Image (spheres, rainbow, N blue to C red):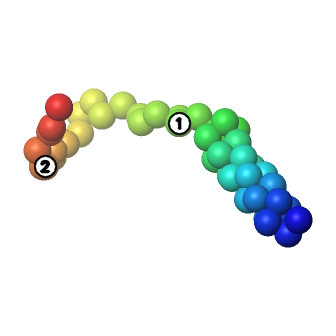
């Protein structure tokens, strides 16, 4: 019985974490304009 309650609690906790971090997360506001600014890009881009 304890294992069933533990499993149910873990599933509920995982659901809450996923829901509030992925579903209800605020959307990205984006970046502002980079016009007139210098941008340095480093590293390699992999496809």
**Residue carrying label 2:** 42
Residue tagged 1: 28
- Tell me the CA gap for discs 1 and 2: 23 Å
**Of the numbered discs in the image, which one, if any, rests on residue 7?**
none
Callout 2 secondary element: loop
Quadrant that contains the C terminus:
top left
Q: Nearer the viewer, residue 11 or 21?
A: 11
Q: Is residue 4 visible?
A: yes
Q: Is residue 18 above or below residue 13?
A: above
Q: 27 or 40: nearer the eye?
A: 27
Task: Give the left or right position of residue 10, taking residue 41 as reference.
Answer: right
- How many neighbours does mark 1 have within 10 angstroms: few (below 14), some (14-19), or many (20 or more)? few
Who's the residue at 82% across and 60% down the image?
4
The residue positioned 59% from the left and 34% from the top of the image is 27
Q: Is residue 9 visible?
A: no
Which of disc 2 and disc 1 is earlier in sequence?
Answer: 1
Residue 34 image point, x, y percent? 30, 34
Which of the 4 image quarters holds residue 25?
top right
Task: Give the image quarter of residue 45.
Answer: top left
Is residue 32 found left or right of 5 in the rendered image?
Answer: left
Cβ atoms under marks 1 and 2 closer than 8 Å: no
Is residue 41 shown left or right of residue 35? left
Give the crowd class for mark 2: few <14, some 14-19, many >=20 residues within 10 Å: few
Query: Farthest residue in the front direction?
Result: 1
Q: Looking at the picture, how far across and down is residue 19, in whole percent? A: 70, 42
């Amino acid at each position: 019985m304890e294992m069933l309650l533990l499993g149910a609690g873990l599933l509920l906790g995982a659901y809450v974490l996923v829901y509030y971090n992925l579903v209800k997360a605020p959307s990205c506001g984006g970046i502002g304009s980079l016009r007139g600014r210098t941008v340095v890009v480093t590293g390699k881009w992999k496809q």
